[in-house]
Structure formats: structure tokens, C-alpha cells
Amino acid sequence: MKNSFLVFTAALAAFTGAHTASAHLTYGGRDFGTLVTGAPATTISSQTVSSSFGWADATDADYGDSHRGRFFRFTLTETTTVSITASRNDVGGQTGAAGLFLPGISLYSGLGQLSPYQPGHDSSALSVSSRPGGTEGSFRSLTDWSLGDDPTYNVSGDPTSGILYPASLAYFTFIGYAVDGTSANFGSEPGIVGDGNADGYITGVFTNLAAGNYSLFVGGANYSAQSTTETGPTTFPTYGVSVSVQAIPEPSTYALGMGLAAFGVLAFRRLRR
């Protein structure tokens, strides 16, 4: 079934909490569980994002580093419309400057490797061999991508014990995106449409999502920061972020009920490369 999504702009809400970044693709503390249509939104406000450019950097031809953002997950049991909000959280324990983080979100069908398999990461041999040479990582904000893990050995950490589970690729099928601001912050890659207001807040409404498991990437949308204000690999600043997810009724009913007619509403076609 074809997917489309709407982006609504609204007022910024304040949340609290922080969490340190992870070196591999995991979902610890970032699982929204199974969404139920009409239930209240679930918010996770205990996370930080590494760098202010991770989403924007992965829009160009040399891919991006999956470590420069955070992955969340949720499950659907039927065809559903889902609203996702990411907002800057300046009291979230970040090391980066307040008032700077601009979020971008990308939604994918599929999950990364789960236990008992090893979590995937950009520098695994399978990840490197499965993408073009010269890329910055495996992550892509605007299209499908894949991520490899390492073998799981019979004795953890001991290759001589034999392989229990061979390395495998996790596949992420692109659904859609929403991004804060304009090309002035997220860069000049053709075809990207932002919400036009770089205020640290973005909401995407994704319609006709089939039953299944979904991964959500949240990262920074300040493209120029990778070369002008932030350095790595060990000194990337972190930024607090709050993420809310809700399964909602059919979009026109939802918009009326929430009074969103007062806000600008943009409808985008699904973007694929």
C-alpha cells in the first residue's frame, strides 16, 4: 500500500531527561511498543543525539554515520496512521549549545539486529562491503539502506570458538521523513522540503502504515555544522531531544479534532531515490 505523510507545525513543548549515545544500532530505552489507535501519545524525553548534523549529512551522495543520531522503534498490528514529533530539549543534559539543535526524522520499515545476534554498526566488515567505497557510513536519510553486524561466536568475543550466528544485514525500507527549517540549515540536496520554520520542532504524520515493525531515526538537520562547528570522532557535542509517537484516526478527522486548521499543513509525496 502506498504511503504518504503530512507535516504539521505547532508550538514547541518542553520535556526533560538525557541519555548517552550508543556505538551500535540498538533500541534500549527507545521502544514505544505496540501502538493503539486513539491512545494518548507516548513520549520518550530521556535521550540525547550525537552532533547537530547527523540527519542532514546522510542526505547526500556519500551517505552518513548512523552513530550521529538515535534509533527508536514501534510496532503496528494493523494499517495505521502514526504521528511522530521530535523536539529540541535544552534541559536534556546535552553538552552542545542550547537553542541550536534542529531535528530531522526518517521512518523505515524493519528493525536492526536483535538479541541473540550482534547489533549492527557502520564499521562492521559486512557494512563496509555492502556500500560504495568512500562513504562516511551506511546510514541514508531519504532512501532504503542496510547495516551489517559481526558474527556471534559460540563463546562471546572468542573467534576460535566457532561461529554460532554468521554476520547478517538488516534492511531498512524508507517510508518518509520530516525536517525542521529550510535548505539554509539542512543543505541543498534536491527535493527536500522542510517545515519552513527552524524552531527546534517537527511533526510528521505518516499514513497507511502496514502492520509490522518500524525504526525511526532522529538526528540533527544542521548540515554545515559537520565542517564548521563540530569535530570528531570523540568530541561531538550532544543535544537533548524528546520524541513522541501516537497512532491517530484518519488524518482529516485528527486535524479537525486537534484544531490544526490554525496551523500550516503541508502534504508531501513519498520521497525515494
Image: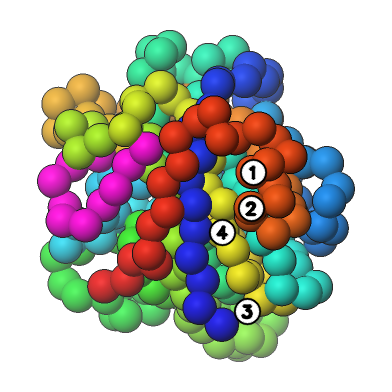
Comparing marks 1 and 3, which lies closer to the viewer?
A: 1
Q: For mark 3, what is the residue?
A: 153
Q: CA distance from mark 2 to mark 1?
A: 5 Å
Q: Quadrant of residue 37?
A: bottom right
Q: Of the residues under marks 1 and 3, which one precedes in the sequence?
A: 3
Residue 255, disc: 1
On residue 206, the disc is: 4
Q: Is residue 222 left or right of residue 109?
A: left
Tag of residue 252 = 2
Q: What is the three-letter code of the residue carrying label 3? A: Tyr
Q: Contact, CB < 8 Å: mark 4 with mark 3?
A: no
Discs 1, 4 touching: Cβ within 8 Å: no
- Are dots 2 and 1 in contact, CB under 8 Å? yes
Is 75 magenta? The answer is: no
Residue drawn at point x = 53 percent, y = 15 percent: 90
Magenta: main secondary structure equals loop
